[in-house]
Image (cartoon, rainbow, N blue to C red):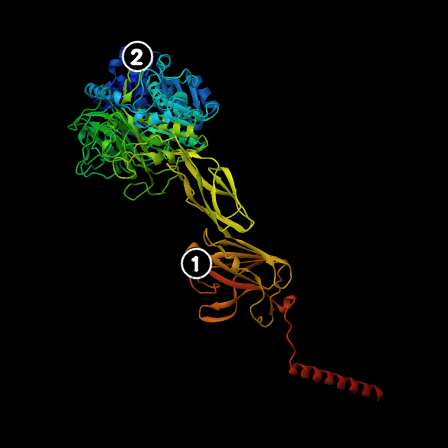
Amino acid sequence: MGKCIGFGSLIKALGLSLGLAMVSAGAFGQAPLGDKSSWTGAEKKMDSALVELTRAAAEGKLQAQRMRELPGNVKEFAKQNVAADQTIFIVIRGDVSPHLTAFIKAHGGTDISEFAPFRTITARVPVAAINDIASRADVQTIGPREQATTNRYELSPKELKAYRERLESLKNLSPGAATNVGSVTWQGVTAHKANLAHAAGKTGTGVRVCVLSDGVNTLAARQATGDLPATVTVLPGQAGSGDEGTAMLEIVYDMAPGASLYFATGFGGSEASMATNIVALGAAPYSCNIIVDDVTYFREGAFQDGPIAQAVNTVTTGGALYFSSAANSGNLTHNRSGTYEGDFVASATPVPPAVQAFYGATPVQSHAFGGLNYTTLTAATTTVSLKWSDALGASGNDYDLVVTNAGGTTVLGSSGRNAQTGTQDPVEISQLGGAGFPVGSRLYVVKSTGAATRAIRLDTNRGRLPIGTGTAGSTFGHNAAANTVSVAAVNVATAGGGAFTGGAANPVETYSSDGPRKMFYQPNGTAITPGNFLFGTSGGTTLNKVDMAAADCGSTSTPGFITFCGTSAAAPTAAAIAALIKGNNPALTRAQVLAAMNTTALDIEAPGFDRDSGVGIVMVPAFAATYTIGGTVSGLGAGKSVGLLNNGGDGVTVNANGGFTFATALASGAAYNVTVGTQPTGQTCSVTNGSGTVGAANITNVAVACIVTAITGPTSTGTGTATATLTGGGAACGFVTGGSGFVAQPAAPPAGVSFPHGFFRFTATSCPAANGGVTITVTYPSAIPPGAQYYKYGKEAGNTIDHYYTIPATVSGNQVTFTITDGQLGDNDLVANGTIIDPGAIGVPAAAGGPAVQPVPTLSQYALMALALGMFLMAARRRQGKRRR
């Protein structure tokens, strides 16, 4: 089984809490711990190991003379975690404030570290103070030291002998030049063709590569032999303990000897401590371009980004690349799965008496693994974890994990003692020291009655599950986060002493973890698919993991890592390849470096992208030659110019249609991205074939097409200058200059209407209806009178004789705006052919006071006027006659 610093002894090395070893349901003479109704409010905030510990302390049983009275699991946990002065390292999650820190100090707390961005404080406190701290309203949860592992695969003696013999036989077969640093050179240098980059003078100079692992115990010794450079910057106080970090730094130095190296431990006792170191490495003064780690915390969220993954998001947003080992928990393709993911389904079979006794009278249900209400271990493990699809820090659904012997008659370990009451993580972990849980052990996933149905994840952490029960999706946590480059492992010996060739010759290691990764929550806890938290109903979102593969099982000079296997070795190998690419062209962005890596990858496993190797084995590009980037411009108007950029710089101005080439040549493997920096006046230019990765030839197919989107000219009536602009209709939609402009009215206007500015006639092409309507805005030299409408002259559906009609339009000041869709109202050819033909104008009614067409009076009107005048004169004479009389 894969191990870190001796995975079988991980419990003692890292202070891990042990599972219930043959636990009596009546420990301490109280209700069974599985019956959480007996817990106090403070106890419900604690990890169950701390509940047992504080209860034992309250009864005086942590005194040396009474330790033998404790149940075996409590005694062992106290032995491994409680110091002689009755203090213990704890992780407090809650509202970090001076008041809480002062309270912890007042209750005997020492070695206090605050991680405010991650709502975490770690401290060493007296066991007797834990209840008081947990009773505070600003404390959410308290647990023991959070446990982590590196992702080294520790070979058996037989495997180690075979690997060393094979590597020795291939030692003299490596072709090509290489920069050999120190007493030992990582075989991945040749397998990934980094030796050819070195021969071309490409060594990663100017790039900062930062490593997180356990520690760098023999750093000075490796520097003395030349296997590491004289300068390796270690974050103050963060050297850690162990030597896996030293071995990882050796790999980076062999692969990219020109890069600057930095280190910080990932083992600080909490996820928050590692997250803090990641953020520090990404910020000034370290400003790492590339960060790589090989750490997994058992408690990390599987379905939501936890503190470490959130730190990865921070540094990648700042432009850094982040690589991480995919882990060594096996993959489904090679029948080595130790993971089960699926939706909880209640079994009709009751749990055995030994399990039910753990809960007392509390009714529970177990998950149905096919026809059984449990599954079994087919390979031993020290650690089993259970997670489900609630948000981190907000789980109100209580699921438990119980491990029994093969007959189901004795409880070997359980995580079913933690309470989930709405503020805890959806995580349960059961561990057993020594040889761990043996083959045949039963794993029961238990749900408290009334808990909502959730997606569940059972992880044996390098154990194995029966074929047919195990699933894909082994990689999790920050190792499989969206912004992490998750790296699988391929045995370097399969390269035969030369370079990898891909295909069936270079499969992933059977222990290499696979993807994909299902996520149900955003980093802030917001549901991705509210109300849907199940695999079976396609809840959440799926991340295509792993991302790529690189070499493992090569040689370093670090003691204990003479042969270094596991995804712990593959991750720094891939990170160093990124350093070579970045060093060759420092202007490349994070996305462009990844694009270059993906382009070079050799396909292995399933065709195309697959869950085991991602894009395949990433290779170092050929840096010996550089190539130009260019193409052609079309549609550019006379006297106009367009400004183009490559990768946001290296500008070139094109003044006429035809070819163009950027001044800066790029190396093979570099990414390019051509964009329009400055548009020509009255035109819009768009780019096709504008991005990609440079291969082994000049890029000549970048196409820049320019269209006319504005026409300016005098009106046909002499009122001044008008402008028409076009938007919409797709990137290629624009005016045809030969068929567009300001013209006279095509026919006599309708009665009572005038066209003071004449007509605007246009033809627009490459404007299919599928791309939406074309919006035209015409700006006239003077304000448009009230009551004006936009008139069209031409054909309508149902009336193919040219005539005047109006269309909907918006009038504002001296502008009119209208929209026409190809083949619909206003398109004179009435055909959806991508071409819109459209003469039209503002029509002003006579009453508006403009230069309207005046109607000529008719004869009947004159007659009426004469009659009215005669009647008026007659009336006037009668009034004069009356006055005389």
Q: Amino acid at mark 1?
A: Gly
Q: Residues within 10 Å of mark 1 (few under 14, many from 20)?
A: some
Q: Position of residue 487 (x, y in %)?
A: 32, 30
Q: Is residue 737 above or below residue 210?
A: below
Pick the front one: 346 or 617? 617
Looking at the rendered image, the quarter that the N terminus falls into is top left
Q: Dot 2 lies on which element?
A: loop
Residue 834, disc: 1
Q: Which residue is mark 2?
A: 63
Q: Position of residue 103 (x, y in %)?
A: 45, 20
First in sequence, mark 2 or 1: give its number: 2
> Residue 341 appears in which quarter of the rendering?
top left
Any part of residue 445 in sight: yes
Residue 190, disc: none
Residues at discs 2 and 1 in contact (Cβ within 8 Å): no
Q: Position of residue 868 (x, y in %)?
A: 71, 83
Q: Amino acid at mark 2?
A: Gln
| Mark 2 or 1: the one toward you | 1
Q: Position of residue 735 (x, y in %)?
A: 51, 56
Pick the front one: 115 or 554? 554
Q: Is residue 528 above or below residue 221?
A: below
The alpha-carbon separation of the residues under discs 2 and 1 comes to 88 Å
Q: Dot 1 lies on which element?
A: loop
Seen as rendered, the residue at the extreme top is 65
Query: In the picture provided, is 395 more to the left or to the right than 805?
Result: left
Any part of residue 361 in sight: no
Residue sitting at x 37%, y 12%: 224
Looking at the rendered image, the quarter that the C terminus falls into is bottom right
Pick the front one: 451 or 737? 737
> Residue 310 appears in which quarter of the rendering?
top left
